[in-house]
Image: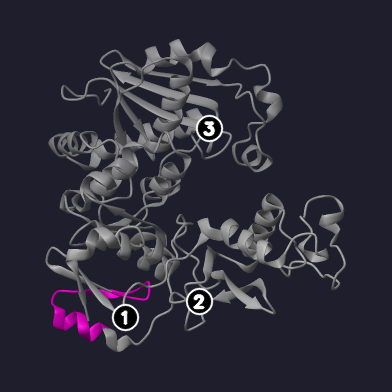
Amino acid sequence: MTLSSSTHPRLAFVDLETTGGTATSDRITEVGIIEVDEDGVREWSSLINPQMHIPEFIQSLTGISNAMVEHAPTFAELADDIQSRLADRIFIAHNARFDHGFLKNEFKRTGHEFRPSVLCTVRLSRKLFPGFARHNLDSLVERHRLHVTERHRALGDAQLIWQFWKVIHQTHALDTIDEAVSKLISHPSLPSRLDSLQIESLPATHGVYLFYGENDLPLYIGKANNLRRRVLSHFSADHASSKELRISQQIERIEWVETAGEIGALLQEAALIKKLMPAHNHQLRANDEVCSWRLLMKNGKLQPMLATIDDLFFGHDPQLYGLFISKRKAADTLKSIADEHALCLALLGLEKGRNGKPCFASQIKKCLGACAGKESIESHNQRIVAAMQDLHVQPWPYDGPIGIRENDAVHVIDCWAYLGTAATLQDASALLEKGQQRFDRDVYQILQKRLSRLDKRIVML
């Protein structure tokens, strides 16, 4: 009894061992394949030389050492054989995105096409045994009393998947299995832990989507002009991006917030990232240490002084230059500008100077000598302004808070701070009761170049 059927007659149960978890940069160290069809069951496995070092913790987990693979064939040498073993079969693996992703990348390197129908036994177990919380391979071993030969070796784990296949044929009707398999292989790119009903519910509208992992840990937040298309693009692209692959391996739940348009999506994305601090978002997060250079005239000399967003005038002041995520970044940028434009570090306050004495930079011809009277202070002042001009921060151009109409919504902004979105002008005015909010660098970057185009949609509040 082969347990292949007229619906799915040719099967391949596959497991891999690898040097790590990233399909685009790590490599395969072992392949195990069990072929099942009308002619019977055949097992095959081979170590593979990954042509890179196997980390110590991977060696201890799998028992596959660098010495064991040193003289093993490379994947390129086995590619034709592996492809023929998998051809025209349903590719069955546990957490199939992992194994499929690695093989897809290996075949791509060798110039082979690899587009099998993919069945994940994690998702199959969830569908057939919905009353259980865990569906990893160790849980299946314990629950179904599978016989373990070599755990974390390719053929040993492939045998466990094959045993699970035989178990479900003892516990479920063939029609039930065929129906479940047909539905699952029609959505091969979805992560194993993700409920396909969530994907089907996604609207094709503007909005923000939130990926959550185990214990409801926020993983990633993104914006979209079409939520459904954008979310699906994450899963279709995960083999080409290590970040996408890591997210897809961890994701368990999706939430989304529909917005009135692109601006609403951008503002919501920035606000939610700051609030939830998802693990895979590194942009749009830090705002607390944002600072800027304020050009002040002191005894006839222009001097940059650091201003932070705690300053009540931050965002209104027309003499702010640069939005930096830290004081160190601000100082490094100012020094680079000084070096590029031969400005005096002493007059800029970046190093100590003595009245009338040349700074060190002037002695090596990297300062034009304003510190020692070789250049007029007026000229130096003018060159500071010119050198900083590209960093000029646009002051808030309105006398107070505004509402930006977008379809049936009003986004409330005050001095480059997003206060929220309302359905009516009355509700928008109520948001002002929050009081003055701190300048937000991301809101500034979202709106600064758009405001002139939004003029007809702006109302004063």
State the scheme by which the image is colored: one colour
Mark 1 or mark 3: whose residue is earlier in sequence: 3
Residue in the image at 52% along x and 70% along y: 320
Residue in the image at 61% along x and 62% along y: 382
Front tag of 3 and 2: 2
Q: Which residue in the structure is indicated by mark 3? A: 17
Relative height, residue 360 to residue 19 (above, below)? below
Three-letter amino acid code of the residue under disc 2: Ile
Residue in the image at 36% along x and 31% along y: 162
Residue 328: x and y in percent read 66, 64
Task: State the SS at label 1.
Answer: loop
Residue in the image at 30% along x and 41% along y: 233
Q: Is residue 167 magenta?
A: no
Using the image, tell me which numbered label, if any, was put on residue 399.
1
Using the image, tell me which numbered label, if any, was put on residue 309.
2
Q: Give the quarter of the image for residue 111.
A: top left
Task: State the SS at label 3.
Answer: strand
Q: Is residue 426 magenta?
A: yes
Mark 3 or mark 2: whose residue is earlier in sequence: 3
Three-letter amino acid code of the residue under disc 1: Asp
Residue 121: x and y in percent read 33, 39
- Point out the image quarter for the C terminus: bottom left
Q: What distance separates the C-alpha of mark 1 from that of mark 3?
A: 63 Å
Relative height, residue 422 to residue 281 (above, below)? below
Segment tinted magenta in the rendering: 413-431
Front tag of 1 and 3: 1
